[in-house]
Image (spheres, grey):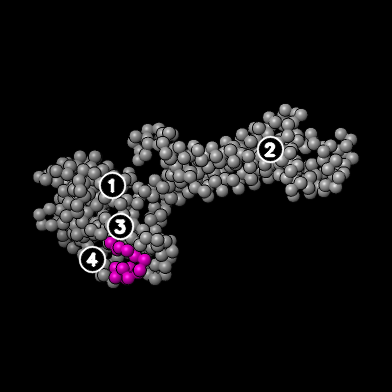
Amino acid sequence: MRLTLRIALRYFLARRRRRAVHFITGIAITGITLGTAALILVLSVFNGFQDLLEQMYGAIDADIRIEMREGKGIVDEGELRKTLQAFPEVDLVAGTLEGKAALRYQGNQRIVRIKGVEQDFFKLNQFRSALSEGDGALIWSDSIVTGIPGLGIANYMGLRTDDFFNPPELVVVPDKIKPGTSPENALRQMPFLPSAFFSFQKEYDDNWVILPIEMTRYLMDYENVLTAYELRLKKGVSSDQFKAQLKVSLGEEYKVLSKFEVHEDIYRVMKNEKFAGYLILTLMLIIAGANIVGGLAVIVIEKQKDISVLKALGATSKQIRNIFLVNGMLVGLTGIIVGGGLAFILGYTQMEYGWMAIEGGETFAVESYPLRLKVLDFVTVSVTVMILSLLAAVGPAIKAAGYTVVEGLRR
C-alpha cells in the first residue's frame, strides 16, 4: 500500500509532457474546490436561518407544549398541573388559553388571535426581550386591564399605549350561548390598554394579542378550560427524551409537542430546502468529477509504458488499479482541503463582519445572511467529494489495470 501511494503521489505531482493533463487536472481541482466551498457555505447559511427561526420563535415558545388530542381544551381542575409539576425534569408549568376575537379601535376593526397567559408564562421564554414602548405588564383589575398586541397590529390599527380615554376593545362571540339570547347580549366585549407591543416574527406580530388569562376566560366564557400547558425544563434536560417519557406517562389522550413540532411545517420546509440545496450543488461536483475522468484517462495513456514496466517487475493488476484510484482521490482531497479552508475563512468573516448583506435587509430581522459553521457539514461534504472522486477514477483505473506487459511496451 505504501508503494501504491508513493507512485500515485509521484504521478499526481509530476510534471507532464502533455499540457492538456495539467489543464484538465487543474480544472477538476478548481471545480471541486469551488463546489466544496459553495456546498459548505450553503449548508451553513441554512444552519444560520434555522438558528434565526429558533431565536425568533424561542421568544414565545416553551420547551414542551401539552394539548388535548380531541376536544375544545384541557379542563383545568389542577390534577394535570400537579402531575406535571411532580416530574423532576420540569422547572415551570404555565397554562394558556387561545381563541379569536375582533379588535376595534377608532372605527377600525381587525380579526386577531388572543392568547391568555398566566404570569409565569414570561418565565418560560424570552418574550420580554421582544417588547417595545412599554414594560409589558399584564394587569387584570377593576380599574384597569392591559394587554400586549403585536407591533404589526399596532401599526395597522394605530394603537397607542397612552390612549386612556379611548382604548381598543376586544369582542368575542362565546361558543356557548343560552337559547333566546339576543345577538347584542351574546357578545362578550372588554376594553384594554396596551402596556407594550411585541415584535419577533411577522406571523405573530400581525395576528396575536397577549392578555391576562382572566380576561381571555371572561371573553370566551370559559371558567376552567385551558388550550395548553406549557413547560420549561431544567437545564441539561433533553426535550426529546423527556417528551417521549411524558407521552408514555400521559397516554394517548394528550399531544406532547416540542418547540420544533409546534412549527413543524416551517422546520420541515427548511430541512427540505437544505437537502435540495445539497443535491443541486452535488450535481456541480459531479460535473467537476467528469474532469477527473478526463485527466486520469490522459495520464493512463501517457503512463502505458510505466504500467507495463511495473507489471513486468511483479505489480499486480489490483495494485495498478489502486494507483489510479488513489490518484483520483488525491485530486478530491486537494479540493476538500483548499475548498474547506476557503469556506471556513469566508464563513467566519461573514459571521464576524456580515460582509454579504441581504438585498432589502433593512426590512428583515437581519441585514446580512446568518451563518453557522458545523463540523458535521464539513464531514458530510468531504465524504461526498471523496466518494465522487473515487467513482470518477474507477473507469480509468480499470483501463490501466487491463493493460498487458506486451501491449504497453509496444506503444
Give the camera-side residue of 356 and 250. Answer: 356
Q: Earlier in the sequence, mark 2 or mark 4?
A: 4
Q: CA distance from mark 3 to mark 1?
A: 14 Å
Amino acid at dot 3: Leu
- Residue range in magenta is 80-94
The residue under label 1 is 130
Q: Name the residue carrying label 2.
A: 292
- Residue 86: say if magenta: yes
In this rendering, the label closer to the viewer, 1 or 4: 1
Q: Of callouts 3 and 4, which one flags the residue occurring earlier in the amino acid sequence?
A: 3
Cα distance in 3D space between marks 2 and 1: 53 Å
Instruction: Please provide percent x and percent y for residue 172.
Output: 21, 54
Can residue 247 be seen in the rendering of this structure? no
Going by the numbered disc 4, the residue's amino acid type is Asn
Disc 3 target residue:
124
Residue on which disc 4 sits: 224
Q: Find numbered disc 4 in the image and state the secondary structure of the residue it sits on.
A: loop
Residue sticking out furthest to the top: 19
* Spatial separation of the CA atoms under disc 2 and disc 3: 55 Å
Upstream in sequence: badge 3 or badge 1? 3
Picture quadrant where residue 364 is located: top left
- C-alpha separation, residue under disc 3 versus residue under disc 4: 21 Å
In-image side of 79 versus 268 (left or right): left
For badge 1, the amino acid type reads: Ala
User: Residue 315, relative to residue 290: is it above or below?
Assistant: below
> Of helix, strand and loop, which one carries label 3?
helix
Give the camera-side residue of 62 and 65.
62
